[in-house]
Image (spheres, rainbow, N blue to C red):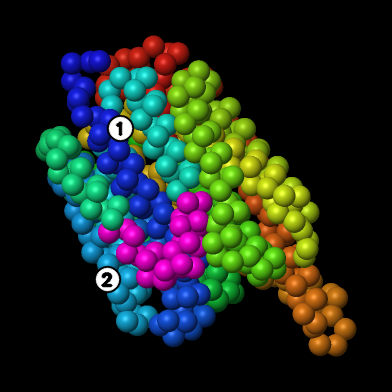
Amino acid sequence: MTADQDPRRWLILAVIAAAQLMVVLDLTVMNLALPSAQRALGFSTADRQWVVTAYALSFGGLLLFCGRLGDLVGRKVTFLTGLAGFAVASAVGGAAVDFPMLVSARACQGVFGALLAPSALSLLATTFKDPKERAKAFGVYGAVAAAGGGLGLLLGGALTTYLSWRWCMYINTGFAAVAIAGGVLLVGRQQKSPGGRLDVPGVLAVSGGMFCLVFGFSNAASHSWRTPSTWAFLGAGVTLLVVFAAWQSRTAHPLLPPRVVLDRNRGGAYLTVLVFGAATFGLFLFLIYYMQVTLGYSAVRSGVAMVPAVVLSGLLATVGNTRLLPRFGPKPMVAAGMLLNAAAMVWLTRIGADSGYASALLGPLMVSGAGNGLIFGMVAATGTFGVAPQDAGVASASINTGQQLGGSIGTALLNTVAASASTRYVSGHVHGRPTPQLLQAAAIHSYTTVFWWCAGIYAFGAVACGTLLRRGPLRRPAGAPVQERPEPAAAAPGQL
């Protein structure tokens, strides 16, 4: 153990894992609770998407700002503030008496989630100094991140079925209480960026740009790509992000220093999580629709059906971080993970109206779980590798930003693809009034079309991300800032 290793670092890892699990769960735990919440509070189907969108807008729009804020004021402060705020917002959401109260609580969850998520990952990156221990720590983190989305579906189904949709919000207070207690007692004072100042124009440009992009893609998903407001927001978002990129190369205190993203491996990691997020929403969203609407699965049964993918994701993320990443580096892991997911999507195109779980779903879920684990086993490690301690927060935030933006793009794109495929199928097969059997066939056709698109996105990711990433284990370039003691090439650290 090196002299500057924190003797409580493994307990700190447990605290960070609990906080990360809470954030990851919240990305999916409400999905299965939405129908029950809609019945209880009486909001319309058109309004329903805002329960998800409000969280994504605030979370995605503020990630880079909150990541840099942690670097400037101290990550312990932002970590604990994020936990406390997330818990309060969750309690308010669980007690919501109407739709505005629920949506406001979800937006506040996104704000504090944006404060919490990069703080947790950067704390992990700066707590573990020894390469082998870093690999183990990020293996645990990767397993939590890889399995958390599936666990959210399982937990959301169980809580909604046996208790109430409100417990999908209340449960966060338990995770937060444990993490707050551990954070106060275990996490020491964190180094601040010396002489750093907040890049206010950069904050306004990137937060506004991310907000416009996420809102534009969400608007396309709920309305249409032909809606003028969709393209107005998308155009404004792109313009603001271009302005932000130009400003970052000119200001003395950039919000996102170009040195963070111009490294090939780190840039490859950010692109990987964006592409992966876009395609993965196809699996979770449309496969759940297929299981519940077509096959008649209950919420809890749908969650249980995802368990094999969850288990394999967690297992492969841990093995990837501790065994594969130090030996082979991120390039083959990303290529293999993307191709496994593409194969799983192609396999899922064989589903039918009366498909059995073992014959049609179990195999693709296991293959996809393995692919997810390989990708999660390298993303955080590669996305934060070699950055100076003062940049750890914004590098961590860049990973979460890619995931949020990718998810928004995927939701909008794949919803549009599904709706168009269903409409074309009905118009091409209808004779008179559409029958229930025709509508069911059209729905299945829309799902399989989405899975083909997802396969194409994963295949693109295998080529584009695999090409961008460097060959071999992670090695710090000559002259790069030192974050921890140099490590042998065969034992490069891992992270998720």
Q: Which residue is mark 1?
A: 125
Local crowd size for mark 2, using a 10 Å CA cut-off: few (<14), some (14–19), many (≥20):
many
Quadrant of the rendering where the N terminus is positioned: top left
Residue 405 versus residue 431: which sits nearer the camera? Answer: 431
Residue 350 versus residue 199: which sits nearer the camera? Answer: 350
Quadrant of the rendering where the C terminus is positioned: top left
Q: Residue furthest right?
A: 431
Secondary structure under tag 1 reads helix
Q: Is residue 7 left or right of residue 369?
A: left
Q: Is residue 7 left or right of residue 105?
A: left
Q: Residue at x 80, y 76 (%)?
A: 437
- What amino acid is at disc 1? Ala
- What amino acid is at disc 2? Val
Q: Which mark is residue 295?
A: none
> Any magenta on residue 233?
no
Tell me where the magenta segment starts and ends, as one range: 150-173
Q: Position of residue 423 (x, y in %)?
A: 73, 74
Q: Position of residue 444 (x, y in %)?
A: 74, 65
The image quadrant that residue 419 belongs to is bottom right
Q: Residue at x 37, y 48 (%)?
A: 21
Q: Is residue 213 left or right of residue 173?
A: right
Residue 213 versus residue 117: which sits nearer the camera? Answer: 117
Q: Which mark is residue 92?
A: 2
Q: CA distance from mark 2 to mark 1?
A: 32 Å
